[in-house]
Amino acid sequence: MIGKTVKVSELAFELDISEYKKILEIQKERQKAMAEVSQILGIDVRLSDEDVAKFAQQEFAEYVQKKISKGVNSWMKSAFS
């Protein structure tokens, strides 16, 4: 696992950068599926490369926020118990 440990005071959490790559691949597959749907329907509902990047970044931001929240919750429990 490729990761980067971020430490703030006594709080530390690990971000798995490979998670972004997985998310990006999922978004690229979504882009391909939307292109197929566009062809079947005869209307353009494809995703641009910019949309794919934007959706991947948003999903990764949610992943990071969940990791931070989980780390903070664990730290709070241990610090105040």
Image (tube, rainbow, N blue to C red):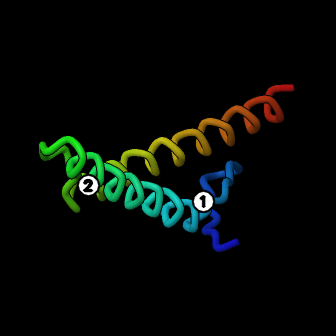
Q: Is residue 30 above or below residue 66?
A: below
Image x and y of residue 5, in percent: 64, 65
Q: Say which residue label 2 marks.
A: 35
**Which of these two is toward me, 45 or 57?**
45
Cα gap from disc 1 to disc 2, whole angstroms: 32 Å
Instruction: Tell me the quarter of the picture where residue 29 sits.
Output: bottom left
Q: Residue at x 61, y 63 (%)?
A: 16
Count of marks, rendered view: 2
Label 1 vs label 2, nearer the camera: 2
Image x and y of residue 6, in percent: 60, 61
Which quadrant does the C terminus fall into? top right
Mark seen at residue 15: 1
Q: Residue at x 19, y 57 (%)?
A: 48
Image x and y of residue 37, in percent: 28, 46
Image x and y of residue 61, in percent: 44, 47
Q: Amino acid at mark 1?
A: Leu
Q: Amino acid at mark 2?
A: Ala
Q: Is residue 26 above or below residue 64?
A: below
User: Residue extending furthest left?
Assistant: 43
